[in-house]
Image (cartoon, rainbow, N blue to C red):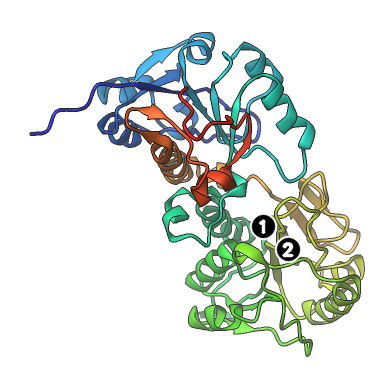
Amino acid sequence: MAETPQATVTFGVLNETSEHESRVALTPDIVTRLRKAGVACLLESGAGAASQYVDDDYIKVGATIASADEVIAQSDVLGFVDRPGEDVIAKAKPGTWIIGMLGSFTDADYVASLEKAGMVGVAIEKLPRQLSSAQSMDEMTSQNSVMGYKAALVAANAYGSFLPMMTTAAGTIRPAKVLILGAGIAGLQAIGTARRLGAVVTAYDVRPASRGEVESLGAKFLDLGLDFSAGQGEGGYARALTPEEQAAQQAAVDEKAAGFDIVITTAKVPGRKPPVLLTKAGVDGLKRGAVIVDCAASDLGGNVEGSKVGTQVTDGGVTIIGAPYLASEVSNTASNLLSRNVADILAHFVRDGRLSIDVNEELDDALIVAGRPASSQAQA
């Protein structure tokens, strides 16, 4: 049996539990994988508790449990579900690598603060997911998959009737009609889950390639009578539409949405304000008791005009649920997937027993956004 190599890199994870966050950036099974790669794991006590992993689970597989200050001080790399706050950056030693969703598309000041503090910032949102070598590292794909699944369950729970058709002695109840706007990773999972719950599902996306994916899951593709044939953007994401295209799309969706009981919106453009897919007129056109789940709701807005994080009910009796934190509500599975993403990014940079960057490596060039060393080899 091969011996586990002596650890040369220390990977630290902090407790990020908050009102909206239950995930952890490292699960016990990934500790075992990283140890085999020569990476020692250090966790703040209680970091995995909200995801159903207690400290003993980590200790049994060789991780060390410590205080937050000890984790920060002793780690060569810190991994995050989201990103560290100013207090963590201030305590971390220069040269510490930070892996997380750093907001590099929209928050240049934050990236600059990492560089000023001497950190090496590895931004997961910049991952070029079209590369086959990067698929297992793609946190956005794994977490959006969980989000889409949960969105269908949240909608079903809020809807005041059955989703499947039911035939009873008292009569037959028709199936719910569900509209999914945005047929990316989250949208496809929402389609599959709503279909398994027995709903009649229709979906729409501006990307031409999405029609086949929607129909392969047994859903109908919503025909708006519009042609956005150049709707595919870089990296597999939908591109941002022009103002004229957005207006045409909104008007058509508003008109079509009136016939549905549940609307789930999942369209995000990384680093930008989410596109408005359903306007106030569209919301007002829905029948009383209809439910909207807006997975893109955020401080920047959402896919539904007027949506905000949380639940609101319109004067017309339509429930709008702004739900950007759905992956955290499936924290055990979401953490399993996310920790694999973070660990695979870390393992990619552990070369010859040290942390290093190859300036000629496409993946390295895309991910490193702050504190990039001038030389081609950088040891932590």
- The residue lying at 66 percent from left, 76 percent from top is 207
Q: From the image, which quarter does the N terminus lie in? A: top left
**Residue 238 at x, y percent in the picture:** 68, 68
Residue 255, above or below 282? below
3D distance between C-alphas at marks 2 and 1? 7 Å
Q: Mark 2 points at which residue?
A: 291
Amino acid type, mark 2? Val
Q: Residues within 10 Å of mark 1 (few under 14, many from 20)?
A: some
Residue 377, above or below 90? below
Q: Mark 1 points at which residue?
A: 158
Q: In which quarter of the image is residue 164?
A: bottom right
The number of discs equals 2
The local secondary structure at tag 2 comes to strand
Res. 174 visible in picture: no
Q: Do the residues labelled 2 and 1 touch (CB within 8 Å)?
A: yes
Residue 9, above or below 103? above
- The residue lying at 52 percent from left, 53 percent from top is 146
